[in-house]
Image: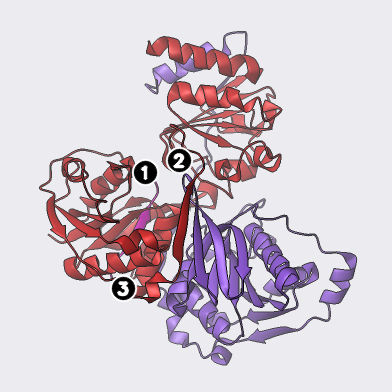
Amino acid sequence: MAEVLVVVDAVDGNVKKVTFELLTAARQLGEPAAVVLGGPGAASGLKDKLAEYGAAKVYLVENEDITGYSVAPKAEALAAVAELASPAAILLSSSFENKEVAARLAVKLESGLLYDAVGVGADGVATQQIFGGAVEVTAKVRKGTPIITVRPNSVAPEPVSGAAEEVPVSVTVSEAAKAAKIVDSVVEEKGSRPQLSDASVVVSGGRGIGNADNFTIIETLADSLGAAVGASRAVVDAGWVPHTMQVGQTGVSVSPQLYIAVGISGAIQHRAGMQTSKTIVAINKDAEAPIFELADFGVVGDLFQVAPQLADEIAKRKS
Amino acid sequence: MNIVVLMKQVPDTEGDRKLDPNDNTVDRAAVDPVINYIDEFAIEEGLLLKEAHGGEVTILTVGPERASESIRKALSMGADKALHVNDEGIHGSDAIATAKVLAKALESLEWDVAIAGTEATDARGSVVPALLAEILGVPQLTGARKVTIEGSTVAIERVTDVGYDKLEAQAPAVISVAEKINEPRYPSFKGIMAAKSKPVEVKSLADLGVDAGEVGLANAWSEVVSFENAPPRQAGQTVKDEGDGGVKIADYLASKKLI
């Protein structure tokens, strides 16, 4: 059976959930083989977790140039692994950086690229949701090795044991790929909250919260659920939170298991970034707010009463 | 400093966007076309760099006849001239083929930096700047929330999950800028009048030396096989808060095993 390469996303030595989703999806296409791309030591401690989700092999590409320069070295390293493995397909999660890696790889391998898939099938077929989820597309790669980026939370991860045989691959990064040097990496928000783009639960605040200080209500509710925090464009435009928290047509698109919209009216710009969420809950004082048209459960009321009560209730039921 | 801004005309996100069932491509007649929202930040960044370093700002767009309206708007914001690649053979091209056309167009210009928005609101791929850098073999400086240029060194702050990476490269380089990097200016009356006489060069695939067999729907490396308009999401239950709204949500979440 042909191998299917899955590029591993890891943070601080922990494999991200989206990688388990991809390893699960890869089984439909062939034999999953994980690929770790990173600096020296990047792969340590990842093997066992990758084995739990069925990785037959783990290709290890550790090279300081991969973390020293932006994007291009990762594409080169992945191309080297692809040459070795002759895979049936290559899967990456749909992060901003991974989509760029996939793009450069597609040029190198002269292969078709599908991005933001929500499902993958045999023979390079993938499903996508476009125009903010308004249209569902079935697309197909018709040249080369299908390179597909898959959105987080699209596939339910299922453990199955794999051998996770380690295959170190040594690469020499070309001078051309060392054109954009990373001179510094700055951590601005080292919070304990999950990352917005691939979180299972997201709590977002809108204009209804009134001012920047009141955003703590959103954060408290999010923390009660272990959720990521988002915001509508109005809140970002007002300067209450940074742009990286913007959920919508522009900004971050999310598809979590649960999305809670607090004080968000549900303008088209916002809906386009969240309406493919599995379950949507809305709290808004305006019964006519469009957000209620797509909410599975809505409460018309004062968010300053309802949201803290919800946070307390969740905390109570957890203990 | 010669600055090229890559601009895409897209269907307005406020409209009811559709695919054309005849060939499964974006129906560009269904909704009014506008400048891709994030490209307005790219145009503004180009104008700011020109103000700081001198030179010219050229708008580069690949698109049908109607894209000329968006080009005129970009010129009225203050860009100096434009190159419009318009050829029926481009219709249905995937991102990779589009990037090949853009690469040839850039090779026909003198440029130090090419600036794009991080993504277009129609396809949302955010792959064209990376493709372009790969094809041209020039540095990729993408996802920028800040751009600075000193001599031939171009530096950006690339947005990451936890903050930003500071990147440095030598021009010529491809840059993509994130939403909110600046505040795009509105065209002034003077700008609108001046735009009418600014040069817009229109080129075909043949003019650029692009092999027609590499672009277009028939030659795309990926294809849309079929599509369906998603059924509108059904509204569920909405209740009025009677002092127990939070508890009711918790009950609902528990019933769905979400808590």
Relative to the observer, which residue lies in front, B166 or A88?
Answer: B166
Give me the C-alpha separation between circle 1 and circle 3.
Answer: 26 Å
Instruction: Give how far across and how far down residue A184 sits, in percent.
Output: 47, 55
Horizontally, is A208 left or right of B97 in the view?
A: right
In the figure, the shade used to draw chain A is red
Q: Main secondary structure of the magenta part?
A: loop
Instruction: Give how far across and how far down residue A92 sits, in percent.
Output: 33, 55
Horizontally, is B78 left or right of B127 in the view?
A: right
Q: Are marks 2 and 1 in contact (CB under 8 Å)?
A: yes
Q: State the extent of the magenta-drawn residues as a range.
A: A143-153
In the rendered image, the vertical position of residue B1 relative to residue A188, given as above or below: below
User: Which residue is disc 1 drawn over?
Assistant: A154
Quarter of the image where one finds residue A112: bottom left
Looking at the image, is mark 2 or mark 1 earlier in the sequence? 1
Q: Are marks 1 and 3 in contact (CB under 8 Å)?
A: no
Within-10-Å neighbours for mark 1: few <14, some 14–19, many 20+? many
Which is in the foreground here, disc 1 or disc 3? Answer: 3
Amino acid under label 1?
Ser
User: Which residue is disc 3 drawn over?
Assistant: A109
**Chain identity for the colour purple used in the image:** B
The answer, for residue B87, to whether it is visible in the render is yes
User: Which residue is disc 2 drawn over?
Assistant: A255
Relative to the observer, which residue lies in front, A138 or A162?
Answer: A162
In the rendered image, the vertical position of residue A317 relative to residue A279, given as above or below: above
